[in-house]
Image: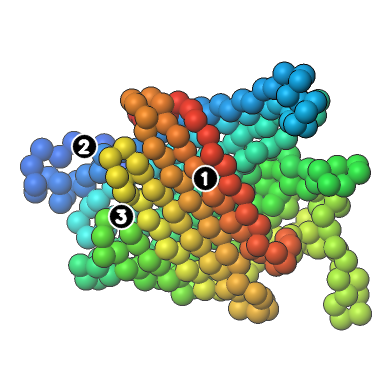
Amino acid sequence: MKKKVLLTIIYLAFTSFTFAQEIPQTHEDSLRIGWWDPRNTQFGINFSQTGFNDAWSGAQGSVGSIGLGFLFNNKAVYHKKKGVFSSDIQFQYGMLKNKGQEAVKSIDRIFMDAKYASKLSPTINWFAGVNFLSQFAAGYDLKAANKPMISNLFAPAFLAEGVGLEWKPQKYFVLQLGGATLRQTFVTNDKVFENTAKEVTENGQIIKRSYGTEKGKVLNEMGFQFVAAFDKDIAKNVNLKWRYQGFLAYAPKNKPMDHNISLIATAKVNKYMNVNFTLLGLYDADIVKKFQISEGLAVGLLFTL
């Protein structure tokens, strides 16, 4: 199972580099060969630190901390005749350590999306796409006494493939309806499965499930997928990128709608320094029947390649 998921990640990460070896010289060449939009690749390092002397700590009860984070973003768009291939990769990872405590993750996200779209009208396209969502490293339930591991690489992981229609009135905004979407949920780490599994009774049998999956199996669901995405410089040196993804499963059974929201605002202070704000929201009844929210504000270095 891990091998299949890894192959999918490799495909999504490198598929944007497999097109158009010949460089077009004329407009006719562009239509025949195809062309790339200017590529947008970013690598960033964020750092945060707070410190207090003994007098401040004793009077205010404050604790010093150190935070370090990394991000990698790559967006590639390739055109050929009426077709457009796009690839969007977002990697984020960060650690936070409070004085006297162990280091913990502050953010951990793997997101990859690849899509082919073809024009039906100036603003309406049909599309076929695949996206993948997971995390890099182990996560623990810090509220429990024994701090069990509840997530890790590919545990859980979500892979979705779909076809449908999209409305794209502007280059920076798109609204998609995936009328036929297949989603797979993986839990490839046995320790994560055992620490997060819940027992349910079906047809008189007791079944253990983690993130909706049974041990050693993949949860396959058919449903409708809704995506709205926005990526634009909203002011000088300020970029706003947000994405909403909803999935409504109807087979093998109806389930509450899953919601996945990401928002990244980046303000460039100078050529390399930036301030960024990240907001992540998630609702998946197979994980917890509450809306999960994560947010962070950081200052760091951002290199555009």
Disc 3 + disc 1, Cβ < 8 Å: no
Position of residue 68 measured from the top left corner of the image (x, y, whole percent): 60, 28
Residue beneath the point at 69% across and 52% down: 156
**Left or right, residue 35 beside residue 196:** left
Disc 2 crowd, CA 10 A, few/some/many (<14, 14-19, 20+): few
Residue 6 vs residue 227, the one in the foreground:
227
Q: CA distance from mark 1 to mark 2?
A: 38 Å
Please name whichever residue, 150 or 293, is drawn nearer the observer in this view of the structure.
293
Q: Which mark is residue 172?
A: 3
Instruction: Find out whether the residues at labels 1 and 2 contact each other: C-beta distance under 8 Å.
Output: no
Q: Secondary structure at mark 3?
A: loop
The residue type indicated by label 2 comes to Glu
Front disc: 3 or 2: 3
Q: Nearer the viewer, residue 107 or 76?
A: 107
Residue 33: percent from the left, percent from the top? 19, 46
Q: CA distance from mark 3 to mark 2?
A: 27 Å
Q: Earlier in the sequence, mark 1 or mark 2?
A: 2
**Mark 3 surroundings: few (<14), some (14-19) or many (≥20) residues within 10 A:** few
Which residue has dot 2 on it?
22
- Label 1: element kind: strand
User: Which SS class for mark 2?
Assistant: loop
Q: In the rendered image of this protein, does residue 43 appear above or below residue 164? A: above
Badge 1 is on which residue?
A: 278
Q: Earlier in the sequence, mark 3 or mark 2?
A: 2
Image point (42%, 63%), residue name: 228
Name which residue type carries label 1: Thr
Q: Nearer the viewer, residue 303 or 163?
A: 303
Q: Residue at x 65, y 62 (%)?
A: 291
Residue 6 % position (x, y): 60, 43
Q: Is residue 14 visible?
A: no
> Which callout, 3 or 1, points at the residue further toward the start of the chain?
3
At label 1, counting other C-alpha atoms closer than 10 Å, the crowd grade (few under 14, some 14-19, many 20 or more) is some
